[in-house]
Every structure is written in structure tokens, then in C-alpha cells.
Image (cartoon, rainbow, N blue to C red):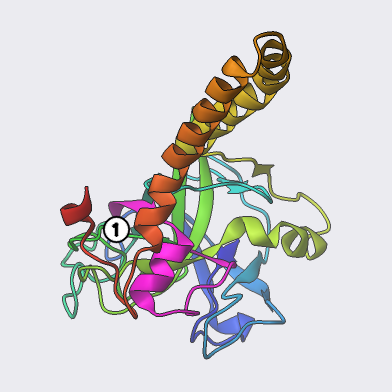
Amino acid sequence: MLFAFFYYRTEPFIWEVFLGRQKLTDGNTKNEVSRKIGKIVVHPRFNSITFDNDIALLRLSSSVKFTDYIRPVCLAERGSTFSNGTTSWVTGWGNVAEGVPLPYPKTLQEVKVPVIGNRQCNCLLGKGSVTDNMICAGVLPGGSDSCQGDSGGPMVSKQRSRWIQSGVVSFGDGCARPSLPGVYTRVSRYQSWINSNIRFNKPGFMPFASTWFLITNLVSNLIHSLLPLFRVLASSYRGRLFSLSRGIVRRYLAFLSIYDFLILTCSASRLLDLSVLV
């Protein structure tokens, strides 16, 4: 099992894991099972100041049988891409607002948040605060976010019929504040480390590619495949079609750069109001 290390103690004997539970205050013994923790493996390069490599593994004391209420989730494979706007879901029993605990009967909550690219996230949270081992998600106007008590929980995205875990709740500045997205541990960066610590029954890693990435990649490959044809035609028509092809490529590259320009345009530590630019 994956979870964020954060402030947690690493003595296995103090922990117990409940699987299949929906309400914290009203355990359903029919659908849930519990296991003690046999071992906790904290990432050796975890930084308690920057929260880089905020990830750990829990080894259960015994195996668990999957049911309709207890199912595994696929993990994002190395190289997976979660572009700006990728729809994600976070679940947990944390606060429903800053300083506001989840009310009785403490039913498991979910929140829908879009991914925010690391460059934009660094503009918002402060340069250098978001590393390549992290992924951000949130709503820029505020109002939707993970919160205190959700740390260690999963962030997932759906690809066709499969749910793939992209992140682990790590840290944030308050909860659901405008222009302050939540920060999550990027699961795809830890495939080798996870596999190296699990001898048997290794987790399933699946590649994930956002729709925006797939479209731009397809168009890019199409243009590059057509360039040789443009060059041949250009030599036959005294360069006129070659000039046309170069113009098409320039327009395509300009189109791709618009999004990057918007997310890179920021003042010292705050992103400019994109609603004015769009």
C-alpha cells in the first residue's frame, strides 16, 4: 500500500489498516477487513522540509482477498503524462473546510480537481517549491481541494475503464484557497523504487496519457511525416509549396506555444489573471 510519509511515525505496531470501510464511525464488518502493519518502508530520500519524495510503503501482516468493496488500483507507469486540466479525483475523510472536521457519520468524501502543470504551480506556490517528483491539482478560483486529514490518500484519473493513481496527497497551503492548489507525490516517478521493495505480487503499473498530450503528439507526428513530401513538392514548384509548408509548421508551433505562454506568464510569485488574457 502507498501512503505519504509526512509527519507520521514509522513504528509498524501502532498502525492498523481498514479496507472496505466507508464510514469512519460506523464500521461495516460485513464489507470491511482489517490488517496490522508488518513493515513500513519510507523513501530514503524523503525531505521533511521540502516534502520531496513524500512516499512510503506499508506491508500488511497478511494478504487480503479482493471483493466488490475492496479492489486494487493501477499505478501510473513511469513516463505517464498528466497535462493541465486532466480530471482527477481525490478521496478521504479529512476536513471539509479549513478547521471544519468531517461531520458524523464521517462518510468517505470525494472531490474533483483538475491537474495544474508544475511550471504554473511553481508560479503560484513559489519558485522551487514543486519538484519533478510532485504533481499539483486544484481549482484556481478555489473551493475544491484535499484538506487536513486527507494526507496519504489517493488521487486518481480514469483512462477508458481503468482508474489509475497519479498522486498521493502530500501538502498544501490551507484548503481550497484561490490560486493555491494542493500538491501530491507523483506516483509515476517511483515505479523502480516500489518494485525494488516488493518481491512478490508486484502492483500493476499502467501508462497514462492525457487527451491533450495525445492530440498534440498525433498532430506533431503527422506534420513531421508530411515534411519530406512538402520538400519534394517544393523543389518541383520552385519553393512556393515549401514556403507554404513552413508557414503551416510555424502556425502549428505557435498554437502549441500559446498554452505554455499562458502558464509561464507570472510575476514574482503569482500568476497573472488568465481570465483577462483569454
* Residue 82 is covered by the magenta coloring: no
Q: Is residue 74 above or below residue 94?
A: above
In this rendering, position of residue 33 left or right of residue 2: left
* Residue 111 is covered by the magenta coloring: yes
- Please say whether residue 215 is visible from this viewpoint: yes
Q: Amino acid at mark 1?
A: Lys
Residue sitting at the far bottom:
49
- Quarter placement of the N terminus: bottom right
Residue 116 point in image, percent of width and height? 39, 57
- Please say whether residue 30 is visible from this viewpoint: no
Q: Is residue 65 above or below residue 215?
A: below
- The residue segment tinted magenta is 109-135
Return the residue at label 1.
Answer: 23
Residue in the picture at 32% in, 67% down = 181
Residue in the picture at 31% in, 65% down = 146
In this rendering, position of residue 235 left or right of residue 129: right
Residue 261 point in image, percent of width and height? 40, 55
Residue in the picture at 71% in, 57% down = 191
How many C-alpha atoms fall within 10 Å of the one at disc 1: few (<14), some, or many (≥20)? some
In this rendering, position of residue 113 left or right of residue 247: left
Q: SS at mark 1?
A: loop
Residue 142 point in image, percent of width and height? 19, 63
In this rendering, position of residue 17 left or right of residue 137: right
Residue in the picture at 59% in, 30% down = 220
Q: Nearer the viewer, residue 43 or 15?
A: 43
Residue sitting at the far front:
238
Residue 37 point in image, percent of width and height? 62, 72
